[in-house]
Amino acid sequence: MAHGAGGKASRRLVEGLFAPLLFASSSEPLGDAAHLDFNGTRIAITTDSFVVKPLSFPGGSIGELAVNGTVNDLAVSGARAEAMVVTYVLEAGLPTPVLEAEVRAMGNAARKAGVRIAGGDTKVVEHGKADSMYITTTGIGRPLHWLNIDPKSVRPGDRILLSGPIGDHGITILLARGELDLEADLRSDTRSVLPLVEVLVKAAGPGIRWMRDPTRGGVATSLNELARDCGCGIVLLEEMIPMHDAVRGACELLGLDPLHIANEGQFLVVVAPEYADAALNALTLAPGGENAQVIGEVREQPSGAVLVTTRYGGSRIVDMLVGDPLPRIC
Amino acid sequence: MKFVDEFRDPEVITRTSEEIHRLADPSRHYRIMEVCGGHTHAIYRFGLKDLLPSNIELIHGPGCPVCVLPMGRIDDGLSIARQPGVIFAAFGDMMRVPGTQGSPLEHKARGMDVRIVYSPSDALKLARVNPDKHVMFFAIGFETTAPSTALTLVRAKNEGIRNFSVFCNHVTIIPAIRAILDSPDMRIDAFIGPGHVSTVIGCRPYEWIAKNENKPVAVSGFEPLDILQSIVMVLRQLKAEEARIENQYKRVVPWEGNHAALRAMADVFELRPYFEWRGLGFISQSALRIRESFAEWDSEQRFHVPGVRVTDPKAAQCGEVLKGVLKPHQCKLFGKECTPEHPVGALMVSSEGSCAAYFNYEHRKTAMVTSIASVA
Amino acid sequence: MCLAIPGQVVELFPDQPSTALIDVVGVRRKVDLGLLQDNLPVKGDWVLIHVGFAMSKISEEDALDQMRTLRMLGEAEAAVQEVEGYGLDHSGNAKAS
């Protein structure tokens, strides 16, 4: 079960089982999308599955996640999504209005993101399977100019930027499940980050070393993966990490670490220091990027790990998520 | 966040840290124990060790109700839940604690109905909305949590909700502290007292620590400034060769405790003659069980409980780490066979267990303790 | 055993005297007031919440008092240093040489 949560167990499954058996050149670090070369034409391709309970929640639904998630994976790999194909696995007995609502949501999200839905497939499985609906989207896109995303290019002195407040999606879902009896004025942050990425590329393209969308497992997991892939240390300043009050309140109440909570409309970017100001300015001036922040920098130590420091000098190591974040009372 | 942010003020934290440096006698080595697992977690989460001089050693105490639960009790709880029509409800803290056949989450993956609840009253609510099932609430916690379980049982009885029972593993803090002080291999100079337990039991129950054992105690809150101020308080006492109970957490802890909470506990619970604590062995009068008057809501009366004793794997040194005799990384299994991903003992599972705290927050920091300049 | 958070009482329910709606920076939950039945909070009071139960009222006065004490820590020391800077010993007499 822990293998789906996005943290250590997921990583082991992918690297330990899938990569050696399936991937041709598995010496490259695994990214959000693959950029392939066909006799000089470069195409980016990615796929993702969407499993969420409840299907619909404040701020969106599985349909939007399915479109935006794939658009974002392509965007942070340095590509503009052009088209996607969709697979639905539906649970027998799923009410038609529910299915229709999701298909509509996907259509709207695709139009908003400027992506063509070029085709798809549907399967129905017996009642009790598929949690109502699973959606898979496979997207292709065109690589953006000026980008050479490579964790190995990350070096000490580089700055780490975050596009906006963390934790909105994960906490919204947790509250929407209704098991904890908590209410808050929170919405999922699901959106296409492509417009922000394009603004960023224009302003600071040559300085962009690495990008990622911190979905399952949160910012901590994405940055731990980077630290591992580049061999450097990531040092964050806690006070700089943007977060809505309600996310903070829910995390304090439940004993959760916001750095482990999933996001669906944010991205991390590592830029060379001489481009950091231009990058931050461009983001904060763009619609939807007002809350972008520099949250830390790359250092030599602690090599391969992520350290969170505070203004008063205390610090702690933040590891990758192990399993799903669980509320605690102790 | 009010009553939180003030106590995380960076400037005041720096000043308090400087005061600690001033107070600490460089010729002494101080061993201060924080009893409560919540304090262990806070110390690591806020990086408070970075703010102390090197001659102050913080020893992690046994106040982690998940850590001290023997594996046999988890097996017992899960065996009840294996009966058809039973829902196993527990706090998130319990979900990854390994029993001999796996943890509650692993049982869930195999088809058992396992639910995470934030409150015992949520478990009772589950019983109300699932009248055809039986909800078994696996209760853990010290005196902080026991009154809430007690009130929930009162409500269940008053409302006549019969498809609900509690598997009670509540333990009490004073016997644990006594066991630490009685232990021949321990030398503690002062205690940081458990702030939230004290909202229920007050400060009086610690008076014997000052009177008979001659050790200062500061009953402490959980924010950085609370813990740092508590250290200032005990250092001042040690300097003046005093031993008193001080209430650092005055804004929340009443000296006399919470009578309504103590009444609820007395109505519903009684002390078990003895109870096995992981790492500390059998301790008399240290745990609670449900009174006869609430027998119908006692899982141990409603269901057959195997009651098998399970000893920890020989190589695991949970007991010594719990008592503070060993540091987590000194256990032979630490970081190798025992990690948060595949824990052997509960100290690695519980977020306030010293092994988990040490593993998650600390063990890779040792490389760069000195030069952490602030980020631009 | 220790995760407890301050929250403000924002709504009481006349038909459920043992229940209150509390707010923690915008997150709301109903909590049980049964443990505070001897001294029930009113709307606007701050309480400490643990596992969905209110454990204790929070005294703003004590909180302010504590912060005052802590803020004075550095000031007392700064005052001492200032006095030492005048070349006086601690009794206010001029130091020898």
Image: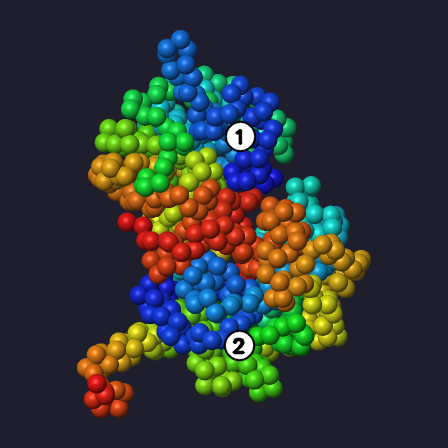
Left of B308 or right of it: where is B208? left
Image mark 2: chain = B
Left of B301 or right of it: where is B11? left
Left of C75 or right of it: where is A170? right
Above-or-below relation of B368 to C18: above
CB-based contact (under 8 Å), mark 1 and mark 2: no
Residue found farthest to the top: A39
Left of B95 or right of it: where is C29? left
Q: Which residue lies at the image location 29% right of the left edge and 24% below the top edge?
A: A146
User: In the image, are marks 1 and 2 on the same chain?
Assistant: no
Residue found farthest to the left: C86
Q: Which mark is residue B190?
A: 2
Above-or-below relation of B271 to B305: below
How far from the left and from the top, in percent, is residue B250? 43, 77
Q: What element carries label 2?
A: strand
Image quadrant holding the C terminus of chain A, namely bottom right
Q: Is the residue marked by circle 2 packed among few (<14), some (14-19), or many (20+) residues within 10 Å?
A: many
Above-or-below relation of B54 to A111: below
The amino acid beneath tag 2 is Ala
Q: Residue B153 carries which label?
A: none
Residue found farthest to the front: C97
What is the C-alpha distance between the residues marked 1 and 2?
57 Å
Image quadrant holding the N terminus of chain A, namely top right
Q: Which mark is residue A134?
A: 1
The amino acid beneath tag 1 is Tyr
How far from the left and from the top, in percent, is residue C82? 22, 78
How far from the left and from the top, in percent, is residue C85? 21, 79
